[in-house]
Amino acid sequence: MAGNAKVARLAVGDLSYMRRALALFGEVFEDLPSYCANQPDDGWLADLLGDPNFVFHVALDGERVVGAMASYVLRKFEQARREIYIYDLAVAEDRRRQGIATGLIAALKGVAREIGAYVIYVQADHGDDPAVALYTKLGAREDVMHFDILP
C-alpha cells in the first residue's frame, strides 16, 4: 500500500495498465508525443513485461494508475552481481506527497532483495527539487554527469 494506492508489478497480461501508465508518464513529463503517439504493439509490450530484466510497477487507486515506475536489471561484468536502474518514475499530480513514489521504490527494493541486486540507482534532473528530495531521503547522493551519445 502506498498512500491508499495498491502497488503491483505488471506481468505479461497487464497491457491495459501498461498503456495507462504510459499516458501517465506523458502527462507528468509533459511529453505526450513520446509516450503516447507511437506506442509499441501488444506483442512488444507483452515481451517486455515478460523480460525478467525489465521491472514495471504501478500504483493503483481502483483501476486508475496514479503512479508508475519502469526499471531495468543490469548484470554486471566486474563481479557476479546485479544492479537496478530506475528509468522513469511518475506520480499523478493530484496524488503527490502521499507516499506513492516511496511505495513504488519499496516494492522495487523487494525485487532487488529477491534477485540479489546490490544497489538501486536513479537519476534526477537539476531543478527537479521534489525528486531530489525524495531520492536524498532514500539514498546516498552522487553528483555525476550524464551524456547522450547519438548512434
Image: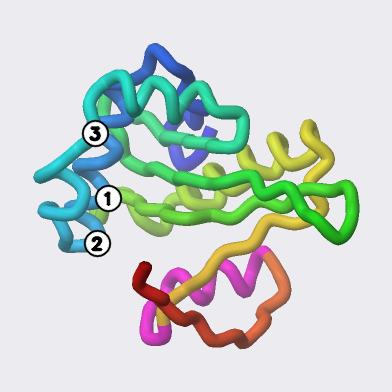
Q: Report how far apart the C-alphas of labels 1 and 2 lie in the structure.
A: 6 Å
The magenta stretch is: 126-138
Q: Report how far apart the C-alphas of labels 1 and 3 lie in the structure.
A: 15 Å
**Image x and y of residue 121, in percent:** 64, 62
**Image x and y of residue 145, in percent:** 54, 86
The residue that label 1 is drawn on is 25
**Image x and y of residue 52, in percent:** 61, 29
Vertical arrangement, residue 43 with respect to residue 69, above or below = above
Q: Residue 29 carries which label?
A: 2
Instruction: Give the amino acid type for the residue marked by disc 2 in the picture.
Output: Phe
Residue 109 belongs to the span the image colors magenta: no
Q: How crowded is mark 2: few (under 14 residues within 10 Å), some or many (20 or more)?
A: some
From the viewer's side, name the closer residue of 67 and 35.
Answer: 35
* Viewer-side label of 1, 3: 3
Q: Report how far apart the C-alphas of labels 3 and 2 lie in the structure.
A: 19 Å
Q: Which mark is residue 10?
A: none
Instruction: Give the amino acid type for the residue marked by disc 1 in the picture.
Output: Phe
> Dot 3 lies on which element?
loop
In this rendering, position of residue 97 left or right of residue 76: left
Quarter of the figure with residue 46: top left
Q: Residues within 10 Å of mark 1 (few under 14, many from 20)?
A: many
The residue that label 3 is drawn on is 40
